[in-house]
Image (cartoon, coloured by chain):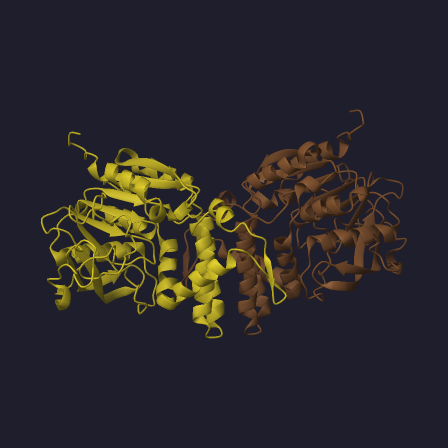
Chain colours: A brown, B yellow
Amino acid sequence: MSLVDIPHHRTDPSFETAGPLGVGSTCAALPAAQRGSADVRLPMLHAGSRRLSLRYELQGPASAPVVFVAGGISANRHLAANAADGDAGWLEGLVAPGRTLDPAQLRLLAFDFVGAEGELDAPIDTADQADAIAALLDALGIARLHAFVGYSYGALIGLQLAVRHAARLQRLVAVSGAHRAHPYAAAWRALQRQAVALGQLQCADAQGLALARQFAMLSYRTPEEFAERFDAAPQLVNGRVRVAAEDYLDVAGGRFAARTPVNAWLRLSESIDLHRVDPRQVHVPTTVIAVEGDRLVPLSEAVTLLEGLGGNGRLRVLRSSFGHDAFLKETDRIDNLLAAALRAPLPGESA
Amino acid sequence: MSLVDIPHHRTDPSFETAGPLGVGSTCAALPAAQRGSADVRLPMLHAGSRRLSLRYELQGPASAPVVFVAGGISANRHLAANAADGDAGWLEGLVAPGRTLDPAQLRLLAFDFVGAEGELDAPIDTADQADAIAALLDALGIARLHAFVGYSYGALIGLQLAVRHAARLQRLVAVSGAHRAHPYAAAWRALQRQAVALGQLQCADAQGLALARQFAMLSYRTPEEFAERFDAAPQLVNGRVRVAAEDYLDVAGGRFAARTPVNAWLRLSESIDLHRVDPRQVHVPTTVIAVEGDRLVPLSEAVTLLEGLGGNGRLRVLRSSFGHDAFLKETDRIDNLLAAALRAPLPGESA
């Protein structure tokens, strides 16, 4: 099945030969990177055939093995500061010299999720994201990934890619994500979407989204972390009770709403809940990394996934008071787990 | 300290001599009960001195030991069907013949929380509730309670009563509540109150409250229960994703909003977060009952409470997939724990 209808591959001219940024910088030279977009026509599961522009970022030596990296629904193509974009990326701590995801050793590819621009107001399946990635690989002339590393929403997409396009990846690392949305986590997200709907009733879209994000943040972290950070008595402000975590949540919610199109968030939140994969149909060597205390993806889900993977799966469990967000916070420990997962011999290889 | 300023004690005339309801009923006769209200002036912690009408319900033999029972913020004075009110009460399964809280063996007292009518739009402390209970006991001529059994918000009030009015109770049973609001649970409630505020922006008070209640419900239950009840694929309804638990949550949220004044809910929700007690100042024999898996009151909080109680405390831990709501659902097991707690010898008594 070809998913690409006359793919047109563009590289942003200004960044095509982007080199180190030297102006006033005492830092080491930033790695070269290539940004661009590929125009494809994608037959979507619930939304018909759509013409999409897939925005990607690619860094690392042209001859190095390619690793695709995908994160949570608010992640994007910019993993870490590079010559094409000097700003910090969402995976700054793990994509760095000396790390397993070292842009000098690997060719790292990431994209903006289908729907991330907020214009596609239709149900988006994780299968659509996987098909889009296959189309993007076609457009870039990449036959096969050395690995797909997915965290949270990215893990769901990785599982779909393994089911639908097994030939495109040698190994999968699925962190804090499983074969389906857990019913409790799905309910939590559905209520967040209702908070947005409540805001939309009065054209207070950003306010609704900020509140939804705050509820989401509680699901990304743990009571243990909050107990350490916010152990202060509540205040009475204008006759109302204000608890210790409220300032932090308010600011974070407002920032998120300012940078996120409401439709993008709604459709990607839905997408997590649409996700369903039969683990028995995954025939790619898969390392599942689960966090004990993850309030969105209970350990029991990772175990069920592992059971379905059979001989293709192995499970590594991390304990962290950061819960679902451990991938973004426990960089040393995650890096060690990634190293083991990416270097593990494939079936038929000797150790 | 007298909290009562010329208490005026009224018994609702129609129920003063309420007897069994016999009309068309094949049930056993309902226990006699007395409903009424006591007018008191209460110096409140954050809201100045207020004139309040404390609405109570009292059932059981006049000579029996008195047990005060208090529940979560949506509970009220009506524990179980009785001759004064044949409707089911909020504690129907535990207040019944043959149970530890048998209205034929004990005199059971309960009240509507201060603020429950929705007219008192001011911060309400759990200390205020405890002071109100002391005033109510004065008005009813009850010197000392055989026990105070509090669940959730009621447990917080029980701890305050033990600190502020130790002479008024012989023993305390504190279920699913501790000496302070946990910072994570406090954040969860604060966001619920913001959902109400978002609704109030557009005079959609009930819609905001219904959403807040749905978020609260997630905190009352557990992922395990949801996984058992709502393990169905999501549906696409009018182009939107609808998850399996959404119908259930919607209906429950709407029902709650229809029967609950917004201000009552806001002020009682705040009250939980205002709650702070030094466990070392509790000098009443106290049984703490905690539920492993309670997402509002982690077991670690119960342990900290127990440490502070020292020789006055003992802890019983229940495992239940109902989480915080176990008190309302695990009736047999809770009944056994209550039996042990109410029959345990007091210091100086022989077993």
The residue sitting at 70% across, 49% down in the picture is: A157
Left or right of residue B208, residue A116 in this image: right
- Considering the image in quadrants, where does the N terminus of chain B appear? bottom left
Q: Is residue B264 above or below residue B156?
A: below
The residue sitting at 69% across, 59% down in the picture is: A124
The answer to whether residue B173 is visible is yes
Left or right of residue B172, residue A138 in this image: right
Residue A120 position within the rendered picture, expressed as x and y whole percent measured from the top left: 71, 65
Taking depth in this image into account, of B159 and B57 the one nearest to the observer is B57
The residue sitting at 55% across, 58% down in the picture is: A190
Taking depth in this image into account, of B129 and B338 the one nearest to the observer is B338
Q: Is residue A3 above or below residue A166?
A: below
Left or right of residue A288, residue B227 in this image: left
Instruction: Kindly indicate the quadrant of the structure image that contains residue B213.
Output: bottom left
Residue B40 position within the rendered picture, expressed as x and y whole percent measured from the top left: 18, 64
Taking depth in this image into account, of A336 and A7 the one nearest to the observer is A7
The answer to whether residue B261 is visible is no
Left or right of residue A339, residue A14 in this image: right
Residue A210 position within the rendered picture, expressed as x and y whole percent measured from the top left: 57, 62
The number of discs equals: 0
Residue A309 position within the rendered picture, expressed as x and y whole percent measured from the top left: 67, 37
- Considering the image in quadrants, where does the C terminus of chain B appear? top left
